[in-house]
Amino acid sequence: MEKQEKETRNTPAHLFTIRVWSEEIEDGIREWRGKVQNVSTEEGHYFHGWNALIELLHRLVSEDQLEE
């Protein structure tokens, strides 16, 4: 087995579903919104905007690593 395969097997994995939609927030101004759901725990989190999605995913993965 190659070294990369071993490292991948020892690294925790995360599985999320992400639902996104565009919502009008003012006349003609739209914003991407969505929901991230952890497949294992079914815990869901809402977000507004792409940057918020990235921050949310980072936080969820980081929190999981702290619990180990």
Image (cartoon, helix red, strand yellow):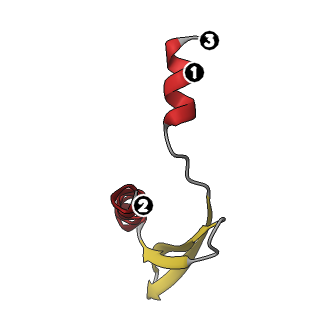
Along the viewing direction, whichever of 16 and 50 lies nearer the viewer: 16
Task: Residue 5: give its label.
Answer: 1
Residues under numbered marks 1 and 2 in contact, where contact means CB atoms less than 8 Å apart: no
> Please, which residue is most extreme toward the top here?
2
Along the viewing direction, whichever of 27 and 23 lies nearer the viewer: 23
* Marks 1 and 2, the one that precedes in the sequence: 1
Q: Amino acid at mark 3?
A: Met
User: Which quadrant of the view contains residue 48?
Assistant: bottom left
Q: Position of residue 17 (x, y in %)?
A: 64, 63
Residue under pointer 2: 64
For the N terminus, the quadrant is top right
Q: Position of residue 67 (x, y in %)?
A: 38, 63
Determine crowd level at label 1: few under 14, some 14-19, many 20+ residues with C-alpha closer than 10 A: few
Q: Amino acid at mark 1?
A: Glu
Q: Residue at x 57, y 32 (%)?
A: 9
Q: Residue at x 44, y 86 (%)?
A: 25
Task: Residue 1: give its label.
Answer: 3
Q: Amino acid at mark 2?
A: Asp
